[in-house]
Amino acid sequence: MSKTAASKIKPLGDRVLVKRIEESEQVRGGIIIPDSAKEKPQEAEVIALGSGKKDDSGKPQSFEVKVGDRVLISKYGGTEVKVEEETWLLLREDDILGILQS
């Protein structure tokens, strides 16, 4: 993972920059599934955080996730962004379903 590419994207507001964690490719029964037919991985690593939501008085609220957390994300949430041949995902903190415990 290139930290320089990630440093070029600064999420705004309650958005979170994540990198999908690709599952290792397995071949079963001699059949290789093409990338276009594979399901998108739901596991990702948090790379960067925005400034956070603001409450009614304008004070920023802290995120429940932190940089480096492995999280479970919704399959089709967020916006894919390609920088320097790497694909990142920008999504709202609400699109994060949970934090994976190690």
Image (cartoon, rainbow, N blue to C red):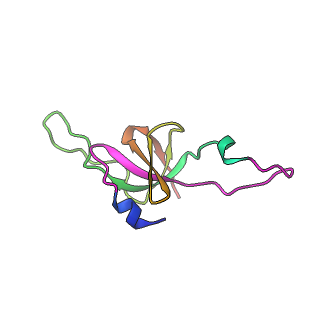
Q: Residue at x 21, y 39 (%)?
A: 54
Residue farthest front in this picture: 84
Tell me where residue 70 appears, x and y as whole percent: 49, 54
- Taking the magenta stretch, the answer to whether it contains residue 25 is yes
Question: Magenta region: which residues?
Answer: 9-33
Residue farthest right in this picture: 29
Q: How many marks on residues? A: 0
Position of 44 compared to 47: left or right? Answer: right
Q: Residue at x 43, y 38 (%)?
A: 95
Tell me where residue 7 appears, x and y as whole percent: 34, 62
Tell me where residue 43 appears, x and y as whole percent: 54, 49
Specify the quadrant of the image occupied by residue 42.
Answer: top right
- The vertical placement of 76 against 60, above or below, is above
Work out whether residue 6 or residue 26 is closer to the camera in this orientation and state it.
Answer: 6
Tell me where residue 61 appears, x and y as whole percent: 24, 44
Q: Residue at x 39, y 60 (%)?
A: 6
- Taking the magenta stretch, the answer to whether it contains residue 62 is no
Give the overall secondary structure of the magenta segment.
loop
Position of 69 compared to 64: left or right? Answer: right
Q: Residue at x 38, y 66 (%)?
A: 4
Residue farthest top in this picture: 56
